[in-house]
Amino acid sequence: MSDTTINDERVKEMSRLRRALIRPELGGIVGTVAVFTFFAMFAFDSGMFNAQGIMNWSTVSAQFMIIAVGACLLMIAGEFDLSVGSMIGFAGMMIAIFGVVLAWPMWLAILVTFVICIACGALNGYIVVKTGLPSFIVTLATLFILRGFTIFIPQTIESKTIIGGIREASEGDWLAPLFGAKIGGPVFRWLGDVGVIGVFERGNRMGEPVVDGIPMLIVWAVGLVVVGHVVLTRTRFGNWIFAAGGDAQAARYAGVPVDAVKIRMFMFTAFCATVFAVCQVMEFGSAGADRGLLKEFEAIIAVVIGGALLTGGYGSVIGAALGALIFGVVQQGLFFANVESSLFRVFLGVILLLAVILNTYIRRLITGER
């Protein structure tokens, strides 16, 4: 073998350390270990790690996780969607308008809401790919449009911005339980009866277990993470997502339908936001015009913590899920540790800055930049 071949960068063997450092999940793994270690030291006896405490931060993490999956795939494809938070509020309000005010069957209200929101996502994607405008600007405009409609519509129809009665309107519906029910109730009751390791003992609610089931919100979160990960890492469409975000022009030359990929990712992001919205209104039994505020930024931060590059073409759904888990644990952990809850926003800012610095270093490792 010639010296030229030996020194060629394309065939140079990469060390295990370097290979580990460029894994997109690295930041999420490190952050998860650090967060759990911290709260295990300072809040272990607070109830954070008993059955109810685990369910609390798991539910909050699942909320972040659902929207982080959509944001992750879209960011890997090279785009952003700042309308996610407004989409959550808008979708919840549409369900309330259709299902409560107009008295439609709840399953129909949910399905029509999904169609409307996914259509909005498709419109976002179409405008971005056809005009060449930055998705930041297009979806920022959508953010204001959807939030405005979310306030205007209920004020015009009902003269208020909060509409209740969703839980009552959902009774007997076949589709609503897929978003608002709990699963595993009999299992948890059995665990309560046998008192497994003293964690699932009966609570004070008329003999019911402390945890009476797993909310569908968590089921949706886990399901979306699994599907997103498989699509991204095991399918040709996943390769197209990476290619569209890495070098769109080169991907087009290679036959990748870049425009279609990006539009579908905007639609999937809208789908995830709507899933979140439906689960939320089923849980609270009402829709409010202020729901979803700042959720778009929290989703993006979770994705960045999970290792996705802001420039696109690199990232991991598992990493984004870990970023969402960090959010949920910290948000609830501050309460259990008796720390001022407003510091959660400080945490978001600090961890975003650290994640961007780490991602910049990783990009330089990948590209060889100095």
Image (cartoon, helix red, strand yellow):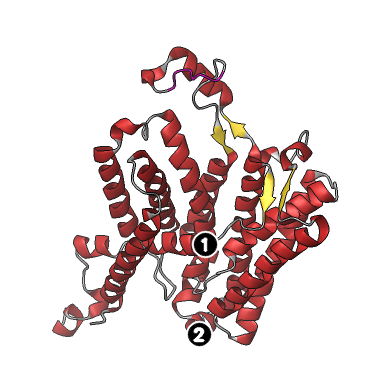
Q: Which mark is residue 249?
A: 2
Instruction: Residue at 74%, 52% (x, y): give it.
Output: 95
User: The residue tagged with tag 1: helix, strand or loop?
Assistant: loop
Q: Is residue 182 found left or right of 312 in the rendered image?
A: right
The numbered mark, 2 or 1, whose residue comes first in the sequence reads 2
Q: Is residue 62 found left or right of 345 in the rendered image?
A: right
Q: Is residue 230 found left or right of 260 in the rendered image?
A: left
Above or below residue 8? Residue 52 is above
Above or below residue 31? Residue 178 is above
- Please report the bounds of the magenta region as a residue range: 200-205
**Which of 366/216 is in front?**
216
Tell me residue 8's x, y (percent).
Answer: 22, 81
The quadrant of the rendering that contains the C terminus is: bottom left
> Main SS of the magenta segment?
loop
Q: Is residue 269 visible?
A: no
Tell me residue 345's x, y (percent).
Answer: 40, 58
Q: Is residue 127 visible?
A: yes
Name which quarter of the figure residue 4 lies in: bottom left
Tell me residue 319's x, y (percent).
Answer: 39, 56
Q: Where is mark 1, residue-wise?
A: 294
